[in-house]
């Protein structure tokens, strides 16, 4: 069940990322966003692939899952271009909401799915009393740098 929730969350996040690229009217800003999201997607794709592979899924199941995830950005870009083509006052206010959803969905998946599992995995492997504090500091530092 965790596999499915993780895949859906990352796929929705991927679609919203594509929307953010597709609605950008300025080509230079669009290319900047494309570069930033592509580098982010590289890391997320690797992590998602490693997570799915460690779940013991078949190669066919892994391929389908990664295909679904990778098509999300393309679908989002197409939808974003269509939204930009028929821009109205409603779409002007919806773009910041979509950007917030893209950031929020990644934060949600990280905080509620990935971190608790990694924390429990790390607690069983280390005996250092400050391990949890180090995790919190580096997590906060990472989000601060990205923001």
Image: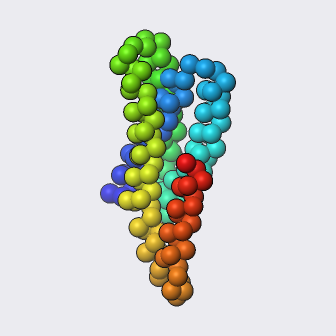
Q: Is residue 10 visible?
A: no
Question: Farthest residue in the left direction?
Answer: 1
Q: Position of residue 37 (x, y in %)?
A: 59, 39
Residue drawn at the location 38% of the way across and 59% of the way down: 112
In the image, 11: left or right of 135?
left
Residue drawn at the location 58% of the way across and 50% of the way down: 146
* Quadrant into which the N terminus falls: bottom left
Residue nearest the observer in this picture, 77 or 46: 77
Residue nearest the observer in this picture, 89 or 6: 89
Tell me if residue 107 comes above or below residue 95 in the rendering. below
In the image, 95: left or right of 147?
left
Tell me if residue 92 comes above or below residue 113 in the rendering. above
Q: Position of residue 129 (x, y in %)?
A: 51, 86
Q: Position of residue 32 (x, y in %)?
A: 65, 32
Tell me if residue 116 comes above or below residue 13 in the rendering. below
Tell me if residue 127 comes above or below residue 89 in the rendering. below
Residue drawn at the location 50% of the way across and 59% of the way down: 51
Residue nearest the observer in this picture, 99 or 50: 99
Residue drawn at the location 47% of the way across and 12% of the way down: 85
Q: Is residue 28 visible?
A: yes
Q: Position of residue 106 (x, y in %)?
A: 45, 48
């Amino acid at each position: 069940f965790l596999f499915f929730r993780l895949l859906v969350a990352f796929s929705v996040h991927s679609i919203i990322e594509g929307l953010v690229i597709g609605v950008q009217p300025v080509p230079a800003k669009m290319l900047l966003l494309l570069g930033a999201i592509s580098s982010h997607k590289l890391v997320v794709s690797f992590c998602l692939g490693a997570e799915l592979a460690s779940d013991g899924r078949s190669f066919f199941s892994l391929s389908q899952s990664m295909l679904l995830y990778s098509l999300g950005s393309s679908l989002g870009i197409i939808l974003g271009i269509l939204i930009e083509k028929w821009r109205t006052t409603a779409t002007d206010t919806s773009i910041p909401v979509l950007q917030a959803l893209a950031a929020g969905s990644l934060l949600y998946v990280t905080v509620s799915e990935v971190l608790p599992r990694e924390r429990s995995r790390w607690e069983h492997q280390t005996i250092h009393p400050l391990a949890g504090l180090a995790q919190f500091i580096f997590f906060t530092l990472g989000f601060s740098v990205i923001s």
